Image (tube, rainbow, N blue to C red):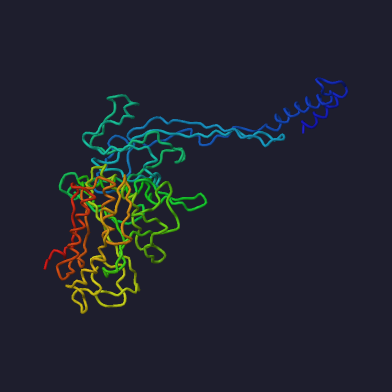
């Protein structure tokens, strides 16, 4: 308002003087001077009352520390426990200042906002050592990702050293190592997410029995890595699916660790079973018929709507997502995860080899026919094969022992040959982490096994390889000259040797019932 008034007064005074300055009339000069004075007066009058606003400021901190003689927990197995603060720094205050601008046209300027945040470092004693690790952390009852906390874990070993940050603050030689006590150190813990206060922490720790070197965690030397399915379950990097319109979602990070699920599983394995040095890595393709002459074995996918970003598009044996078949669904959900992508399999092998694991590669067949499949049952003659049967039931069109079976004849050998296929090691080209195929257009047993062998060669670091597992009924099929499936497996092993080299062990993982003999 003062701007308008003084602008008019200035124009009147300038007009009374008359003349011009630098080509401008005294009326215009007077209006400008009056408006400037009025604007300054407006801002002074209308800006009164704007005060600095402070948010998050804490006048007094309270930190509960342990007193002398507080009990230290004894933990066995996996347990969630609290802790005792045994050391802390002073609180560090940080201030962010933001001045809100005015709306223009004479409106007052906004207030100044000062936002306060705090941080500190502290050490929390957990329990008697030696623990294998801290798996999860809760703050005020809500689980928080361990990776967000800048937390160092001391297991309570008898040779652990003092924390370097504690020594940097307190002085070298002035900090105990707390040997025999498991504890964690939070470095520069930001308190703003917790309302600018130190939250109540609790921890899930794992502590194996200490006095028995032959207990289960120490005695187990090898495990099987299952389920063998999941398009990106073996990936060691986060994989994001593109959902369209700029949105995406990660598919293989499903724990508060915020790490890929495979990495989290492998860490838990090494933490909880320190004696484990061998892993059987299971990777599944899918069979669709119990009649070996009609059965195909191929990789399949969980969904065909969305593809992964950043070079992680699903691809197995030159098959893309657009070309692959879906695994069956039930209640609008896939009954299995899809076949792990070739790239994720290579990642998993390399990660385990880097950690000193001996990798046994275990190709696996999952049968995916559902109820009402319309495929004749070779064992009973019924119109349908059972839902999701065992691969060990793959046999002839008419199973041995039933009337009309070709068992013991040349026709049986022909059925087995159709199942085994004709792909050879020469049909596969092995690159650095990649495999391509240029052989016959077939989804046969040989393509299934030889692709996996080529993939192991591309990854490197595989200790042993299985040319099959639990093909109980198939290996018992007889021709007029012997056991054709057994002969085919032996020939297949030689092809795998050509791909894998002389140092990789080759084997067949028989079902227990295959050992009884004839």
362 versus 73 height, above or below: below
Q: Quadrant of residue 35?
A: top right
Q: Where does residue 63 sit, x and y in percent of width and height?
A: 39, 36
Q: Residue at x 18, y 58 (%)?
A: 490
Q: Residue at x 14, y 68 (%)?
A: 481
Residue in front for this viewpoint, 232 or 176: 232
Would residue 34 be seen by someone viewing this image from the given angle? yes
Q: Quadrant of residue 390?
A: bottom left
10 versus 470 height, above or below: above
Q: Residue at x 80, y 24 (%)?
A: 29
On-image quarter of the C terminus: bottom left
Residue in front for this viewpoint, 307 or 486: 486
Q: Where does residue 134 sit, x and y in percent of width and height?
A: 30, 43
Would residue 80 be seen by someone viewing this image from the given angle? no
Count of picture labels? 0
Q: Quadrant of residue 24?
A: top right
151 versus 489 height, above or below: above
On-image quarter of the N terminus: top right
Residue in front for this viewpoint, 313 or 8: 313
Q: Where does residue 293 sit, x and y in percent of width and height?
A: 27, 69
Q: Is 415 positioned to the left or the right of 438 in the image?
A: left
Farthest residue toward the bottom?
403
Q: Where does residue 301 sit, x and y in percent of width and height?
A: 38, 59
Q: Residue at x 42, y 35 (%)?
A: 62
């Amino acid at each position: 308002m003062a701007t308008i008034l003084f602008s008019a007064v200035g124009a009147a005074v300038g007009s009374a003087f008359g003349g011009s300055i630098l080509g401008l009339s005294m009326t215009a000069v007077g209006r400008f001077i009056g408006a400037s004075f009025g604007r300054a007066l407006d801002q002074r009058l209308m800006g009164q009352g704007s005060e600095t606003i402070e948010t998050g400021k804490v006048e007094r901190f309270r930190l509960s520390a342990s007193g002398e003689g507080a009990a230290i927990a004894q933990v066995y197995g996996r347990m969630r426990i609290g802790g005792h603060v045994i050391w802390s720094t002073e609180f560090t205050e940080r201030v962010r200042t933001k001045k809100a601008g005015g709306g223009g046209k004479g409106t007052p300027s906004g207030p100044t906002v000062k936002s306060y945040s705090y941080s500190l470092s502290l050490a929390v004693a957990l329990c008697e050592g030696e623990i294998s690790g801290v798996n999860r952390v809760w703050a005020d009852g809500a689980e928080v990702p361990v990776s967000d906390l800048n937390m160092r874990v001391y297991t309570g070993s008898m040779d652990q050293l003092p924390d370097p940050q504690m020594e940097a603050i307190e002085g070298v030689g002035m900090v105990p190592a707390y040997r025999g006590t498991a504890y964690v150190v939070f470095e520069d813990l930001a308190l703003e997410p917790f309302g600018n206060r130190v939250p109540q922490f609790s921890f899930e720790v794992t502590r194996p029995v200490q006095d028995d070197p032959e207990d289960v965690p120490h005695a187990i030397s090898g495990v099987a890595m299952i389920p063998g399915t999941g398009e990106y379950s073996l990936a060691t990097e986060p994989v994001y699916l593109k959902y369209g319109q700029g949105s995406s979602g990660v598919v293989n990070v499903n724990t508060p660790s915020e790490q890929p699920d495979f990495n989290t599983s492998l860490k838990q394995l090494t933490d909880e079973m320190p004696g484990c040095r061998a892993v059987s890595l299971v990777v599944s393709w899918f069979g669709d018929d119990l009649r070996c002459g009609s059965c195909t074995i191929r990789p399949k996918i969980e969904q065909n709507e969305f593809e992964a970003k950043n070079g992680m598009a699903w691809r197995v044996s030159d098959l893309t997502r657009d070309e692959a078949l879906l695994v069956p669904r039930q209640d609008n959900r896939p009954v299995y995860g899809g076949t792990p992508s070739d790239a994720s399999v290579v990642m998993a092998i390399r990660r385990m080899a880097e950690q000193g694991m001996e990798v046994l590669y275990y190709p696996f067949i999952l049968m995916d026919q559902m109820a009402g499949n319309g495929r004749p049952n070779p064992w009973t003659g019924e119109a349908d094969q059972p839902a999701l049967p065992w691969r060990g039931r793959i046999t002839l069109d008419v199973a041995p022992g039933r009337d009309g079976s070709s068992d013991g004849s040349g026709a049986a050998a022909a059925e087995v040959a159709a199942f085994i296929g004709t792909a050879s090691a020469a049909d596969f080209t092995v690159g650095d982490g990649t495999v391509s195929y240029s052989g016959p257009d077939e989804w046969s047993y040989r393509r299934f096994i030889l692709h996996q062998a080529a993939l192991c060669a591309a990854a490197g670091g595989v200790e042993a390889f299985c040319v099959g597992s639990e093909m109980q009924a198939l290996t018992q099929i007889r021709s007029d000259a012997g056991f054709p499936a057994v002969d085919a497996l032996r020939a297949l092993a030689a092809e795998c040797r050509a791909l894998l080299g002389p140092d990789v062990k080759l084997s067949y993982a028989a079902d227990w019932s295959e050992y009884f003999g004839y």
